[in-house]
Amino acid sequence: MTGGRSERLLEIRGLCVDYGQGPAAVHAVTDADLVLDRGEVLGLAGESGSGKSTLVMAATRLLRPPGVITGGEVRLYPGDGSSVDLLEAGYSALRVLRWSQVSLVLQSAMNALNPVMTIRVQLTDALAAHLPNLSRKERHARAAELLAMVGISGDRLASYPHELSGGMRQRVMIAMALALRPQVVIMDEPTTALDVVTQREILEELKDLRDQFGFSILFITHDLSLLIEIADSIAVMYAGRLVERAPANALFRAPRHPYTLGLLSSFPPLHGPRVAMTGIPGSPPDLRMLPSGCVFHPRCRFAVDRCSVGAPPLETAGGDRVAACWRLHGDGPVPVPPELAVPEPDLAMRSMP
Amino acid sequence: MTLLAAPEQAPAVLEARGLTKHFAVHGTAAAGRRLLRRGRGLPAGPAPVVHAVDDVSLQLTPAHVTAVVGESGSGKSTLARLLARLVMPTSGELLLGGKPAPAGQRRRIDYAKTVQMVLQDPFASLNPVHDVHYHLSRPFRVHGLAKPGADLDDKIAAVLERVALTPADAFWHKYPHELSGGQRQRVAIARAIAVQPRVLLADEPVSMLDVSIRLGVLNLLGDLRDREHLAVLYITHDIASARYLADKIVVMYAGQVVESGPAVQVTDSPAHPYTQLLLSAAPDPERTTPVTLRGRGAPPSAVAPPSGCRFRTRCPHAMAICAEQVPPAFPAGPAHVSSCWLLDTSVPRRRSAASTGPAADGNGPAAGGDRTDLGEEK
Amino acid sequence: MAVGIGTELEAGGAPAPGVVPAGAAGGRRRALRLPRSPKILAGLGLLTFFVLLSIIGPFVAPYSPDQIFANSPVPLPPSAAHWLGTTNLQQDVFSQLLAGGGDMLLVSFLAGVLATALSVVVGVTAGYLGGWADELLSMLANIFLVMPALPLLVILFGFLGKTGSNDLFLVGLIISVTGWAWGARVLRAQTLSMRNRDYIDSARIIGERRWRIIFTEILPNLTPIVASSFLFTVLYAVGTYTAMAFLGLVNPDWNWGGMLFYAQGANAELTGYWWWFIPPGLAVALLGTSLVMLNFGIDEFINPRLRAAGLTRRAEGRGRSGSGRPGGQRPARVRRVRRSQQFALTPVIRTMGRAPAAVGSGSEVLP
């Protein structure tokens, strides 16, 4: 990404998150590095046990016990030249940052809305907490404005959550998340529980809002095919580790990590001749009993002896891409597998804005 | 309306004709309103019902996978339960091997020997207090297919191997919570095929599994179709996986079938506006142009569906006739039908535009799909 | 906000950590692992103590409960000869206390067993069959729920007379008549919710018969609730039996309710003879507490969230004290998190080097 977009907004370095402590602790996230630029849509893809939800909940200090952060750094750059380390910040500082700088939209919108309060009350609550100077009338006006922003008419303010459809409730959550014009909106599987048409509508609206307000989106999902369409760059996680990060189109056309390759071949295409596909044999590992060396090697068709000995570091794989795989460097007699060495797509080919 | 069968197909094992299921609405508000109307001497009107499935006809033939694609509320899960006889239809009939499926407890067990089902949630479909051996022994014992002891163990081992859970004795004594989602689903499939049924109904079998293991389970279903010649019904909301596995796709909307035909043809050349909407909304990394959704809004209320074609409230091509009459199934290609008035060739209109179907990227029907050009029935 | 670790671990290759269904019928190679929760251990310990007390009590009592020692009209305070003093008839309070547990426990457990059996039969049948059977059985349970228990018991015991109220079995039976309805309602509700579970539908699809589904699919899943209902009913029976004895409706010799009956008759609470009524009252209260703790422990076991909270506190405590860390490394920077702030912040606890993952251990129960 070039131009005004290259300004760093959120930086996560070496984040480690455990569940529990002592020798029986489960390492949910190990050494995660993520960079989110201003105005960027960063996708975080992974299956169950990958640690993607844990990563963002820990980064925003929202993870509940027994979750514990055991290492790393999370820096937010609000844009005035300063930076805040979220892991060192105190309760009051975080409280200010939350929602005004960083907001969150979670998967089950049905559960996030209080069933005994109207939409108006829930929206104005959030406003009242952060903008105490607004009068009640101003707050109500602002709430109506927020709903209009996501395409819901103001007369639904008086409705209760159960009177709205799933798609509308999720839109209300998005409106709440944007209430204070944050710089980062984190969305954890926001459309998974919705049907595919509503999902598409909401994503379109989200893109429009992003163009209008310029916030960045950290979009977490297991649906890699969706991410390729909507994200600028994608980070792939497996068993708590980041295994690859690349611009979306490059990831799709020229994956560098065997897991990414396998994941891409788990989504049957909508066009072209029907060919047999296999996905990835085996299943994601038990986080309490991780394989030695590279966590993916038992399921990897390119694995060699070295893969079971040491975990590969996240290294550059051309341009601003990174990947963690021993096979990418083709040392000695073992060449780089051709599937992992597809040439990068021409950047000009990418037509998505 | 029955489907146009390709000539080389074997006769259907399980056939549904005009299946309809309406659920009564238990609400005091509605009942109260009707009471008030009666009190005022007005006719109370029909009792409100949820139109879950309306007049659905389907054929399941051996060695074929039929996919039913639809969103939540389309009635696809109710259809599966009707075919499994977990619920009884309000009207319509079910034919097993050409003969009406009989009622009664004894016959129910016979039906269970021929028609089996795999449910969506692998965590809920196995009882947590029983181990794998117990779960797999039940179908054999209930239908008297094995004697307890070595015979039973052999048969259980055989069926575990069939679903690629080997070595069998490593899995026997495991409890469901000790298995992964994919393994549990395989145990559920093993339990279903233990009785050697002829029909396997799969209600969203992979929706709750991790992405990388879905294809393994889908390939297993395909393998069962090829080697055991099972008639498989695959219910899903993911049209891409339907295209991958199925021979025939049936698209459902608001309790009715709106389109059906060969899988590749339906996805490459969808004839019904709803199918076109689904395909344009589905994630597609190969897409080169941005998506234009034709037909916003939400599915209609199941209690009071729109008259005529139920999709007309969201359809960009809705005409007057759509509100008046339910469209029958019109041909849209070889073995491909769609219930849409746009395909009605009896009305004078540009034939080429109507019958060639829309472009593959689902950006709307072919040129000439403008409402006024097609003429309106007044 | 839900963390989702449960779904992340369970849904993948990992089995659901630490979940052990209690009382699983037909568990072949799996021993029944009771959770090591402090509540269950304390409750069980206390209950065992009382059971032992009732069994050996009469044999280790220094005197016979109705043995009269002197002729003073006033109860004597505790002394070397009489550890808990005497009653106004100069009987040894301590001996009476030791002798008082047996009948109580016998009747209460009997009532518990009978009532639970009845509630299981009525509740599960009503829940699964539905229709008119459900209507009928629910009406029956509702009638018994609505009937005021105490007046009914007074009347029934009045009918029994002196000889009847000495028969422990009959007393237990009558108490169970007033105690079964609540459990039946709970079990009916549980069965109703279970009836629509996928594994019940799967059993029907396989072709299982109805009665087999009830016994082999539904009942084993209800075991924790049945256990809890049983303990609750025993608790109810303890209270009721004590009340009946206190009111003089059942034979007051010798149980704790009876001691209270006599004490109240002599106005012990007004005149300050605390050694007469406090020990039996305390004994009843402690017995009740042990049952309640067991019940809480089972509740905690059934509801994973309660379990997580309890275990987390223990695990954090262990972590903070530095135990279990290999090589005796001391944490570089430990941030103490105040309990009130546990809702707000994920704690950050950095160590020198990360403790290596224990391969294949997974013994600690962590949700």
Image (spheres, coloured by chain):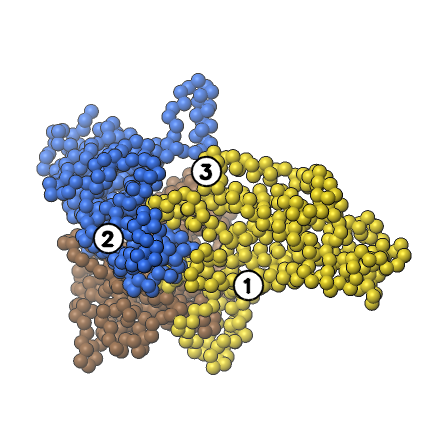
**Distance of label 3 from label 1 (alpha carbons):** 38 Å
> Badge 3: few (under 14), some or many (20 or more) residues near its Cα, within 10 Å?
some
Check disc 2 and report its element: helix, strand or loop: helix
The residue under label 1 is C37
Q: Which amino acid type is shown beneath numbered disc 1?
A: Ser
Output the letter for the chain in brown.
Answer: A
The residue under label 3 is C130
Left of A16 or right of it: where is A208? Answer: left
C289, B333: nearer the viewer: C289
Q: Which amino acid type is shown beneath numbered disc 3?
A: Gly
**Distance of label 3 from label 2 (alpha carbons):** 37 Å
Q: Is residue C10 above or below residue A137?
A: below
Q: Chain of mark 3?
A: C
- Residue A264 in the image: x percent, y percent? 24, 61
Can see residue A56?
no
Check disc 3 and report its element: helix, strand or loop: loop
Q: Chain of mark 1?
A: C
- Residue C336 in the image: x percent, y percent? 54, 70
Nearer-N-terminus badge (3/1): 1
The residue under label 2 is B221
- Residue C191 in the image: x percent, y percent? 47, 45
Chain C in the picture: what colour?
A: yellow
Establish whether labels 3 and 1 are both on one chain: yes
Which residue is depicted at the point 21% across and 32% down?
B327
Output the letter for the chain in blue.
Answer: B
